[in-house]
Image: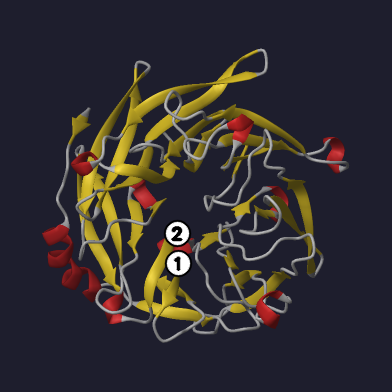
Amino acid sequence: MKYAVCALAGALVAAANTAAAHTRAIDLLDFDQASGYGPWSGVVADKHGTLFGTNSGGGNGPCDGGAGCGTIYSLKRPGTQGQPWTLDVLYDFQNQGDGWFPEAPVTLGPHGSLFGYPAAGSFGKVFQLVPANESWSYNVIYNFTNGSDGNLLDVIAPLVWSGKALYGIASGGVNGCGQEGCGSVFRLMPPPAGSGSWTEKTLFSFSGKTTGGEPSSIVAAGKTLFVATDFGSGAVVEIAPAGHGSWAETVLTRFNGGDDGNAPAHLVIAGDGTIFGTAQQSAGGGLIFELSQSNGNWTRTDIAQISYHGYGPDSLALGPDGSLIGAVEGDVDYYAGGIFRLTSSGGSWSAQQIWNFNRGPDRNPEGVVMGLHNRLYGTLNGGDSDGGAVFELK
């Protein structure tokens, strides 16, 4: 294993004041009962700059004595600078076969559609939300059975649209697997000619010690899938077609705990096929790692060690010019969390904290993504807004 670790505990502190002088964080929206509350998964941005996300509670559904079952929302940019963004609640969960309490982010699909799954409802279900004139149409495209397909009840990673299929990870007792090391990788194929039922296929089932398990994140390059797993100290594996309809696993790197990290998650894949992700460290904080391929061999390089007030990265996304951006959540009483950026020059990575939410507007960032004009957007789950908020960094 190759390492090039840059310690950031002091570097982020030193850079915070400089970065803050050139950055401003603003609250675009404070959620309430009607729009939903508890935006645990951040947002995604489409090519027009519209933001989409889920709220785990609120809305007009009957859950928790009328407190709401959660919502899916959009936030549209204003046509005139300085005007407020426009919030639309695209769907209110009702706990009537549609599920409830969505916590995972939505995934952008073709023709402006959204895919995702609620945190509760039988053994999990995958939905498609399709724009139709001035409204949106909600359809459950697959119900998990907790059989050979596993379940979605312990998964919060986004689905992946690649090629003409939807891919995801499931947890639970697949094929008689015990309580540890379970899980699977699945594919959902749309019906031919756009009518009929979606078809689910379990591509690979984890079985514990030999194959790892407990998948936490998935990305795709065509039909080749890369999955982070939590079983043991965790690993990153490749799941790829092996002929005759079967799929095979190749372990790209294993984590050994301690300073080497554990529980890899939040995988992202760059245009050149390089994979980046996060891992936690037992002493506090965590790592950003890189997986690169040369002549068929994969090499892991730990490019940054992030430990700010003892907290490590809890999200990662691709930024402009090959940079990486991420969030550190923090807590309510001591450290409100922050946003960092990693940039590479000459093969060496450097890090900078670009915002510390002790400066406001709220606290506890749940993720960050790049939108139009290289602006950063995410959600907050603490502070003055009890229901959470959407923020912009510019």
Disc sitting over residue 323 in the figure: none
Residue 21: image quadrant is bottom left
Alpha-carbon span between mark 1 and mark 2: 6 Å
Residue 125 seen? yes
Q: Please tell me which residue lies in front, 55 or 223.
A: 55
Compared to residue 84, the image places residue 296 above or below, namely above
Q: Under tag 1, what secondary structure?
A: strand
Left or right, 18 with respect to 117, comes to left
The C terminus appears in which quarter of the rendering? bottom left
Q: Three-letter amino acid code at disc 2? A: Val
The N terminus appears in which quarter of the rendering? top left
| First of labels 1, 2 by sequence position | 2
Residue 345 seen? no
Q: Please tell me which residue lies in front, 274 or 322.
A: 274
Q: Please tell me which residue lies in front, 383 or 258.
A: 258
Residue 343 rendering spot, x and y as whole percentages: 26, 49
Task: State the residue lying farthest toward the bottom.
Answer: 384
Residue at position x 56%, y 57% from top?
A: 104
Residue 364 rendering spot, x and y as whole percentages: 37, 71
Q: Three-letter amino acid code at disc 1? A: Gly
Residue at position x 61%, y 34% from top?
A: 174
Disc sitting over residue 378 in the figure: 1
Residue 101: image quadrant is bottom right
Residue 199 rendering spot, x and y as whole percentages: 77, 36
Q: CB atoms at circles 1 and 2 under 8 Å apart?
A: yes
Residue 148: image quadrant is top right
Crowding near pointer 2: few (<14 within 10 Å), some, many (20+)? many
Q: Under tag 2, what secondary structure?
A: strand
Residue at position x 33%, y 33% from top?
A: 291
Disc sitting over residue 369 in the figure: 2
